[in-house]
Amino acid sequence: MIGRRRPFRASALTAVAVVFLPGLGLGASPAGAYAPQDAAGTSTAASAGEIADLLHGQRNGAWKSTYRPLASGPTLIRGATVMTAAGEEIEGGDLFMRDGKIVEVGRNLDVPAGTDVIDASGRFVTPGIIDTHSHLGVSPSPSISSTSDTNESTDPNTAEVWAMHSVWPQDPGFTRALAAGVTTLQILPGSANLIGGRGITLKTVPGRTVQEMMFPDAPMALKMACGENPKRVYGGRQRSPRTRMGNMAGYREAFIEAERYRRRWDAWIEGGMTGDVGDAEDAGDAEDVGDTGYTGDARNSKGPPVRDLAKETLAEVLRGAIFVHNHCYRADEMAQMMDLAREFGFRIRSFHHAIEAYKLRDLLARDTVAASMWVDWWGFKLEAYDAVPQNIALVSEAGARAILHTDSDMGIQVMNQDAARAMYAGRAAGIDVGRDEALRWITANPAWALGLDDRVGTLQPGKNADLVIWSGDPFSVYSRADQVFIDGALIYDRSRSDVQPTTDFELGILPSSGQGGDR
Amino acid sequence: MTARTIAAALAVSAALLLSATRPGELAAQNLAIVGATVYPVSGPPIEGATVLVRDGLISAVGMDVPVPADDFAVFDARGKVVTPGFFDAGTQIGLVEIGLESTTVDSRVDGDPVSAAFDVVDGFNPNSTLIPINRLGGVTTTAALPTGGLIAGQGAVIDLTGETVEAMLVKPRAAMAASFGPGAAAATGGARGAASLRLREVLDDARYWASHREAYDRGEVRPLSVSRLDLEALQPVLAGEIPLVVQVDRASDILAVLRIAEEYGVRPVIRRGTEAWMVAEQLAERNVPVIVKPLTSLPDGFDRLGARFDNAAILHEAGVAVAVSSFQSHRAHNIGLEAGNAIRFGLPWDAALRAVTLTPAEIYGVADRYGSIEAGKVGNLVVWSGDPFELSSRAEEVIIRGVRVPRASRQLELLERYRTLDGGHPPAYRGDGDGGPGGS
């Protein structure tokens, strides 16, 4: 049935032809000339961005970030130890930021009149901390059944779900992470499923809606999980997967279907978005064409293929527009997953909880797959039995992308400390780990894993002014985040209660004397 | 001397001479640790002090202690810091190997909310891999506590060295572990009032049983709510000989525990105590210690809405005896990290050191032998490269009962095996040269 639901808005795609693919992702440049024609014969054009949004499930501007930076003026941080995470640690350094960007980093900077000057002598400045693995908002505080929105553990493949649709912006964990210097974090679905769904990258800014917290134009993630969790969850229900080989069959079957789906959509777009896509072979497709909002002759299958949310997400993985973040503890399973990626032609951006990454660090370096790791979690299950506290240092030494992640609402509040501990554990074992290198484990490297390394993760001119002023060396247990800036705006100040966001949830839940303090 | 000036002074410390000694070489010898800054905990720090350990016990500590001419292995610890071994006031080390593998979990009795007679000792695994990993991080002693239910059972104080549990035991049946709040309520009928009712009933029955033992054995008593073994196990609790260590968070739940404890003459210890700071005065008045996890800041349950980083600092300021625990078994060595974070949020440095040494020893009634560096006490010591709470510091030597702990653990073997991935034979051919099962 055509137009069973609301017609597609004329301002967006209205039947277009396009020269296109491969590797079209978010933010791709216009894809070429169109010969568009809508149902009324009016010429229109669809930009590559619009097509990208269509394929990504973000048509009409839906599910996009509405984040706006807080107001900020030009600001100079003066006299700090500036740890750039780009190779330098500048003592007595200055950092100048304006219009949300870092303008200059160095010593004795000249700045325009009207610049706010912050005396940071004796203090340290780092990039804002980035966590590749968080469940804040989806497993928020209070942790009770009514807030448990992380695992859609109803099927081993739930590629159709998006973590952003579970995020509760009033999770007090967001404000705690911010107060600990975290500015960017990736919220992932849980690990009960082989394919858990899409992750979303947020800023630790207070928002009424998740859209107000979304990092603009950040790639989304696909959460996948190896090993014990999926086979425990589903094996216990007498269904597949019950074994690790069942796990692998589950991924492969999903990607075989996704590949077919991707080809059909890509062919339809390449064919001018008006042609017969051959969906007639699938019973019922023609009737469903109206769901897409595209006009076309349904009886002749002259419309886009039928949408399938799960396959849509996996197709975007195959196009490289969604990054795979893969919960995978054991070295042998990581190697299997790298073969899976090879079979279907996608990339795994980062392994997570990569307890045994050190055993496989040469292959991680070779294939440019990052490893997101803890410093010393171990033993809670068998696949976490072979942990060593030098894991991160060894992976880093091998030239692979080493990342310290948390998966913890408490861990995310001490990422600077955990990076320090991983650094010192490495040094104690004779692994030569530098301070800048260790800082990159919680800044530049996670930025790369999230596809944001052109925008955040280092203190370099042109980067977003996301940074932290620490009371002392961030690698000391005694140091605290004094001030946190996001896009050049002061968003947290330890010494000013009016610059400390509080969630709705925490209002009035304690006797008044209980508010404030070191929360 | 503050923690920071110590750290600064130690940053330029002399070369480590301890490493010159071979592992195991000094195992049976008497030790003289010379030149370190010693924190006895029971008194002010002593710079450049000597600590003598003879036959497993500390025999002398001070500035001008002469080292006996013979029979003492001398550690030059100049530039180092020496503290008592850390004492974690509650872990499941030896009771849990792999959390999700039930065949390796011996810390809890399922099915009955009251298992007072349950004693952790028989299930304790002296070969647990957790033991070497944690002691190399500076934990020398722990209270192995059972978990779960309303009354979980009896915990034991354990030194982290020895081939059998008997050899490791410091004090069996040193505490009765319990909990109060939503978990105990769920186990006893749903409401907190149901949990308190059950607790009172059990304590009532235990008191009654004590004065009716013979009648009980003749089968001439009223029905009692729990077994004879549970009733018997509770006698030292009713007598105030061992503490009732109660895991409880909400302020009103803590007050309920204090109320019940007073009714029965029980000596409570609050464990976790997320909202303890809200009732700090009441705790101080009654001399009730609190075992806290300083890295707690989230209202992650409706009984923990008052979570805050400075809980320990507020309690200490109010005069409450504070112990710090990692609340971890696999990573009990993070007790120092926890204490460091307590300092970050206002706990004085000296109080933080006491919170991981002498206060836990006092809680479990072993402070006559543990928790400080004094002549006559057990030789549990750690030589730190610097401030024991600072991230850059490491436990360079761990001494338990006067014996140096070997630098060996499963983690170190894995590290050694995979330190390089150079060609040649696969990693499986590296390490374990001392022949484990199947070894030559």
Image (spheres, rainbow, N blue to C red):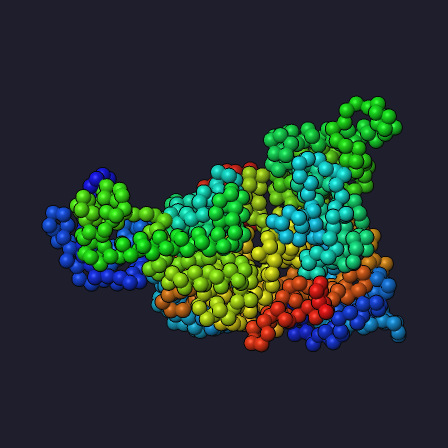
Image quadrant in which the N terminus of chain B is located: bottom right
**Which residue is painted at 37% across and 65% down in the image?**
A454
- Marks counted in the figure total 0
- Percent across and percent down for residue A186 are 44, 55
- Percent across and percent down for residue A364 are 48, 67
Which is nearer the eye, A209 or A232?
A232
Q: Is residue A211 above or below residue A89?
A: above
Q: Is residue B103 above or below residue B418?
A: above
- Percent across and percent down for residue A276 are 19, 51
Q: State whether residue A373 appears in this view.
A: no
Image quadrant in which the C terminus of chain B is located: bottom right
Which is nearer the eye, A123 or B377?
B377
**Which residue is painted at 76% across and 27% down in the image?**
B224
Which is nearer the eye, A450 or A400?
A400
Which is nearer the eye, A373 or B348?
A373
- Percent across and percent down for residue A240 are 48, 47
**Which residue is painted at 11% across and 51% down in the image?**
A42
> Left or right of B300: which side holds B163?
right
